[in-house]
Amino acid sequence: MHARLSTIQMDPARIDEAVSEFEEQDLPAFRQIDGFRGFTLLLDRTSGKVVGTSYWNSREQMEASEGEGDRARQRVADRGGSQSPPAVERYEVALDTFVS
């Protein structure tokens, strides 16, 4: 399994709006992409730091989803009032304890 981790620094007052719109508009598109395994969103309401991690069956499937990932990240950053571009990191998942 592979994971793409995206970090966005948002205006804390706009986090709820950005998360809600991501859940309603962007997440359904991810669910339709081959190899999508899931998504985790972490946030710090005080600082406005938001970290989203998408999980993929393979590196190739994660790479194939890059375009949709780029568009979703930018939409979330814009909605959240980010003043800097999102940071993106990619990893191989060595261990997970998710329950299916």
Image (cartoon, rainbow, N blue to C red):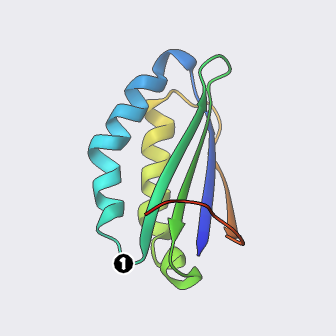
Q: Position of residue 51 (x, y in %)?
A: 61, 42
For image coordinates 61% across by 61% down, the residue present is 97
| Residue depicted at 35% across the width and 32% down the height | 20
Q: Residue 84 location, x and y as percent?
A: 65, 37
Residue 10 in the image: above or below residue 40: above
Neighbourhood count class around disc 1 (C-alpha, 10 Å): few under 14, some 14–19, many 20 upward: some
In this rendering, position of residue 84 left or right of residue 27 = right
Residue position marked by numbered label 1 in the rendering:
34
Q: Is residue 69 left or right of residue 50?
A: left
Q: Residue at x 53, y 42 (%)?
A: 41
Q: Identify which amino acid the numbered label 1 is placed on.
A: Asp
Q: Is residue 84 above or below residue 65?
A: above
Where residue 10 appears, as percent x and y from the top left, is 58, 28
Q: Position of residue 7 (x, y in %)?
A: 64, 44
* Residue 47 sits in quarter: top right
Name of the residue lying farthest toward the bottom:
60
Is 44 left or right of 16, judged from the image as shown?
A: right
Q: Callout 1: helix, strand or loop? A: loop
Count of marks, rendered view: 1
- Above or below, 22 against 97 in this view is above
Which image quarter holds the N terminus? bottom right
Residue shown at the point (45%, 71%) measured from the top left: 65
Near-viewer residue (64 or 53): 53
- Is the C terminus in the top left, top right, bottom left or bottom right quadrant? bottom left
Q: Nearer the viewer, residue 36 or 13?
A: 36
Give the vertical position of 89 relative to 63 (above or below).
Answer: above
